[in-house]
């Protein structure tokens, strides 16, 4: 604290000396601050200093992106495009439409939907007008959209960025601005058919992305609640005990039990009863067995959940995905709005922690752990009703693909692979070995563009052939169309294969077809 | 004011009665307020009231999107996808890479880049940490990206949403959240080659979108400045006179002249001299003539601009686009950062004002006028240097496609057209005429999905054949694969063409190929 206190005093003095009427942002140094809070306050002061001109009297920009965000460079964009194509193809294969909603919503639209996480919502400044917040997920805007347009059934996907003022862990793909890829089915249908299709979709996407082995855990909010009830958990503690159970994928049972007993005030006996259930994993057979369980079968809720679980697995068998799906009683997703089946997909492989890059000054608690969950979702039959003036419900089930973690893995794979990621799709470079042929190069390039060929030409009057070939090597352009006095006279173009260096004269009229043929 | 004042008092009293510790947002009623400001304050109060539970004691949501924003429904998304595909194909044909940047930047990154328009920037609330603003365009983030990563040459496109607290005119495609499609070439190259390619790109995109006839106006910041100088405009008035000239596309010369003389304080003589120049339009010939102009040729700046203009037109001839490009001395784009050539594309057709829909409660000053500019850009050689700590410059030229206006036109065209816009790509619906065949339907659907066919199945145990056929009619699915006891016994599927109602039995093993063949 001491050293930092000094810095801030010096900064403030410097600032106030320059302009006395400056409006300082709330300076909030107190002994209760965390290190990251102090970092943020310092950043704000430095930013303010730069804005005011700084000590040197010249603009000293802090040249960075906002904390927890990143630019995508062309290579990352090429990977992103590839991942999106796989995911969108899958959504379309299942007959989904797509919608888009604004990046911000009325603040009240988000109010009361995220429980404790509401503190992570980004608010916009009150500049006159409505109070706005950046969207926190795509599910709440979707529910608002359905209620607002009185839509009672739709199968839609939505791929867009969402915003959370969370602690970033950038090398593990955890950002404050990140993509969500959501697929949801809204409508009153026969039980578990849309739910099973969501799981089929997760299965298809994770398989096609070739991220290694994975498992999809399934549970049901009603089974959890029934289990808590028959174990003797008081009603008002269901939710908090649920969030403790949710930690079982990161903590040992002993520690989870400790939290239940010491922090949440359960008796050891009750905790042990829960412990027995949450260690159970299986498939349809487990659902059948639990329907016979003398305790659990006394809960109507649990029975409804277990009957649906049985039904779900029979559909999953028809969809040929049961080899990766596990009925796991320890799965307990945090969000308040789930009402039925819930699921989460995890990759089996753990990804080694990469060395943090110098640009990643923002990185917080990076560590070499499993990337964990890459998809999750469930049924939320009450959310749309929260927006409808008359409370009319629209049953929904959906899944969200955790695309940023997938990008991280794909980027690391690309780093390790010898194959170069191309960032353009250019088929041919129009080049020349001689001087004063710019006009001829531009004319030929125009012919190619007009025929739909992806073509480039260097923006130099007289570039060297070597630098033209180098550009192809660097960017992966496979062909060069070389023009010279002789070629112009003969009405041909010399077409060169960059990799093999083989050259062949092609009649100008055939060039388009020849390029197409060679770059299929 | 009176009625409104009463309303606000009543609201406040109601609110304060319910909870005394409520934090009221700044209530800013004053006699200087505009009507739209009052509307916004009222909206804020109503919002607050709803949040607190309202008079009725139940949650009364304001079910809407934020002012000036809109959802995209599936039909609008289908149009958006089509437009993006045309634009992205063009960018890729010209060898462009793509990047992405965060939706918000450090506030200071945007400071001092937009002149008077800075007041339209959306700021985020200070929730501790950095001061952030939503991006206002894609050009400044691009320049920040180049400087931050020390990139000295790149050809990139960037399609993303930007944010302006402007007065929305939604039926004319003017929103507070809207897409920009930017293509820029950064790097030190021989004069006017990249500039000409930007114009070629605008030409290609507007042609392919089939929006009717268009013109691309071209001018140069240096020609404008030289013209002002030789006409006798004082240096310090260049910018303000420039913005008056910019109004010539909406105002008659007489009115523009009045503004110059009465508001900007020019003498009538000087204004008339400007008037002579800004009425000039032409091509390469005009540039050549003006290079001989006794007055204009005395300005070094103007000569440099005119020489480049000549060069530009000779490249445009090679690119075969001179039929739509006009050298127009009245073109004067507003943004501060342009340093050389500037351009703007306008559609010739005027679009009739549509009847405002009931959902468009936000609409402000809609009117049946020309959609105006649909693309614009220019050269900005100094912007990157503003971000580089050592002021190193990276010359840039770029173009931005005004995609929202294009969406508006395409949507209106789709409304008028008899052709139905499909929002899914489903090739076949798996159906059944008999009961108890859900399992068989799911099994067949799985076969189709696994073979890459886009297939749907209704989520009902026993749907009627009629409702299955109706779903196809409504969503444009061309084929139905019908299963029945007999078909299962025979190992065939009845494939029905929805439009022609023709049916044919296809051996199950051939179904995938048959569907592919019929939905090419």
Image: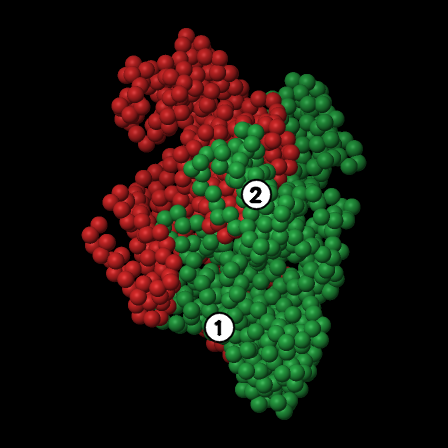
Chain colours: A green, B red
The residue closer to the viewer here, B488 or B8, is B8
Relative to A125, A486 lies left or right: right
- Looking at this rendering, what residue extends furthest in the top direction? B294
Residue at image coords 69%, 73%:
A255
The image quadrant of residue A512 is top right
Instruction: Examine the rendered structure and indicate whether residue A282 appears above or below residue B179.
Output: below
Residue at image coords 68%, 18%:
A435
Where does label 2 land, which residue? A8
Local secondary structure at mark 1: loop
Relative to A96, A321 lies left or right: right
Where does label 1 land, which residue? A381
Residue at image coords 43%, 54%:
A132
**Residue B84 location, x and y as percent?**
52, 46
Which numbered disc flags the more N-terminal residue, 1 or 2? Answer: 2
The residue closer to the viewer here, A362 or A518, is A362
Instruction: Examine the rendered structure and indicate whether residue A275 appears above or below residue B95.
Output: below
The residue closer to the viewer here, A448 or B494, is A448
């Amino acid at each position: 604290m001491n050293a930092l206190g000094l810095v801030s005093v010096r900064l403030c003095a410097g600032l106030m000396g320059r302009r006395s009427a400056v409006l300082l942002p709330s300076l909030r140094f107190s002994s209760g601050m965390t290190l990251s809070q102090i970092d943020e306050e310092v950043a704000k002061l430095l930013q303010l200093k730069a804005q005011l001109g700084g000590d040197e009297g010249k603009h000293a920009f802090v040249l960075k992106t906002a904390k927890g965000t990143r630019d995508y460079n062309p290579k990352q964009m090429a990977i992103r495009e590839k991942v999106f194509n796989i995911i969108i193809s899958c959504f379309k294969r299942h007959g989904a439409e797509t919608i888009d909603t604004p990046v911000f919503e009325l603040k009240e639209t988000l109010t009361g939907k995220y429980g404790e996480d509401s503190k992570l919502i980004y608010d916009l400044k009150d500049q006159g007008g409505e109070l706005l917040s950046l969207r926190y997920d795509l599910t709440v805007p979707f529910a608002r959209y359905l209620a607002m347009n009185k839509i009672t059934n739709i199968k839609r996907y939505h791929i867009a960025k969402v915003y959370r003022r969370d602690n970033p862990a950038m090398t593990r793909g955890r950002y404050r601005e990140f993509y969500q890829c959501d697929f949801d089915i809204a409508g009153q249908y026969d039980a578990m058919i849309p739910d099973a299709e969501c799981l089929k979709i997760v299965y298809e996407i994770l398989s096609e992305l070739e991220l290694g082995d994975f498992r999809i855990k399934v549970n049901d909010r009603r089974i959890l609640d029934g289990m808590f009830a028959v174990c003797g958990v008081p009603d008002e503690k269901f939710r908090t005990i649920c969030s403790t159970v949710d930690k079982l994928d990161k903590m040992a049972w002993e520690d989870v039990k400790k939290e239940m007993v010491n922090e949440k005030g359960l008796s050891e006996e009750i905790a042990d009863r829960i412990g027995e259930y949450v260690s159970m994993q299986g498939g349809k057979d487990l659902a059948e067995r639990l329907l016979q369980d003398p305790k659990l079968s006394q809960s109507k809720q649990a029975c409804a959940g277990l009957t649906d679980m049985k039904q779900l697995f029979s559909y999953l068998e028809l969809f040929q995905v049961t080899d990766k799906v596990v009925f796991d009683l320890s799965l307990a997703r945090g969000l308040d709005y789930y009402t039925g089946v819930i699921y989460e997909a995890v990759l089996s492989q753990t990804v080694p922690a990469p060395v943090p890059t110098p640009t990643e000054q923002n990185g917080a608690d990076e560590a070499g752990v499993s990337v964990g969950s890459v998809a999750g979702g469930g049924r939320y039959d009450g959310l749309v009703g929260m927006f409808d003036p008359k409370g009319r419900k629209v049953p929904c089930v959906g899944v969200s693909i955790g695309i940023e973690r997938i990008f991280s893995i794909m980027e690391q794979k690309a780093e390790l692979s010898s194959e170069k990621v191309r960032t353009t799709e250019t088929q041919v470079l129009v080049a020349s070995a001689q001087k004063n042929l710019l006009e001829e190069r531009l004319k030929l390039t125009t012919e190619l563009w007009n025929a739909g060929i992806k073509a480039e030409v260097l923006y130099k009057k007289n570039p060297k052939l070597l630098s033209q070939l180098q550009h192809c090597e660097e960017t992966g352009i496979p062909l060069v169309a070389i023009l010279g006095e002789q070629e112009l006279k003969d009405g041909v173009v010399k077409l060169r294969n960059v990799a093999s260096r083989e050259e062949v004269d092609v009649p100008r009229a055939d060039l388009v077809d020849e390029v197409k043929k060679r770059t299929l």
